[in-house]
Amino acid sequence: RTSTSGWPAGGERGGRAGGPPGRWASPAGPGERLVPAPAPVLDIAAARRIAADAFCPTAPDGMGVELEWFLRRADGSAPTDDEHDAALAAAAAPLPAGGRVSVEPGGQLELSTPTCTRLPDLLEAARCDAATLQARLAALGLVTVGTGLDPTGGRRRVRSPRYDAMAAYFAARGPATARLGRTMMCATAALQVNVGLGDGRAEAAARWQAAP
């Protein structure tokens, strides 16, 4: 995936923590319920502030990447919960190039690089931090697997209000959507490329159109 943003990489999808106070609610159709709750709801003023911050070109020529992996033992089997917790503890230590590691609902690890303005610097930052992280995991008998879909189907390892709300949203739309939502959350991993909005509205619009 490719996106445009005011701050490339290292944002919320990475572990996907933080964000504004309050809870989002989705419009409900007949027989559906609001997810996660009808109140409190993000008001218009708060939404405008968030949008202004999100699209503020703080790094117009910045770029970054987010690398996601599944965790496996050296023999290819899935780690135990204790092994997974040990991996998260190892990943939490600072990385040499300044990247950050976060975790997805199925336990996927995500490495978000710092914002860079030159492609060679970005590639070196990603290489350096990925190598450091993988060395730490290797010491625990674990490896990263870079594939888009976990053939085992994955399972939920991370509990948070955000992910609970996502699961409830999918479940409210029926068993098929609940199953697909669970697969997306717990059994997929991606490479995401983030680029700044550029200098001025015209360039921002062109980059936005190119992002998909």
Image (cartoon, grey):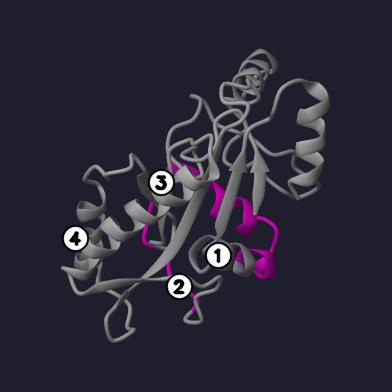
The answer to whether residue 164 shows anywhere in this view is no
Task: Say whether marks 2 and 1 touch (CB < 8 Å).
Answer: yes
Where residue 161 sits: x, y (%)? 45, 42
Q: What is the quadrant of residue 59 in the picture?
A: top right
SS at mark 2 in the image: loop
Where residue 25 sits: x, y (%)? 64, 35
Q: Residue furthest left?
A: 139
- Residue sitting at x 43%, y 69%: 155
Left/right of residue 184 with respect to residue 93 in the rendered view: right
For this rendering, which residue is in front, 117 or 148? 117
Amino acid on which the number 3 mark rests in the picture: Ser
From the image, state whether disc 2 or disc 3 is nearer to you. 2
Task: Say whether marks 3 and 1 touch (CB < 8 Å).
Answer: no
Residue carrying label 4: 86
Of the numbered discs 3 and 4, the one sitting upstream in the chain is 4
Residue carrying label 3: 160
Residue carrying label 1: 182
Of the numbered discs 1 and 4, the one sitting upstream in the chain is 4
Amino acid on which the number 1 mark rests in the picture: Arg
**Gap in Å between the C-alphas at discs 3 and 4?**
19 Å
From the image, state whether disc 2 or disc 4 is nearer to you. 4
Q: Is residue 88 above or below residue 45?
A: below
Amino acid on which the number 2 mark rests in the picture: Gly
Amino acid on which the number 4 mark rests in the picture: Ala
Task: Reply yes or no: does residue 175 show up in magenta.
Answer: yes
From the image, state whether disc 3 or disc 4 is nearer to you. 4
For this rendering, which residue is in front, 146 or 120? 120
The answer to whether residue 105 shows anywhere in this view is yes
- Is the N terminus in the top left, top right, bottom left or bottom right quadrant? bottom right
Q: Which residues are magenta?
A: 153-178
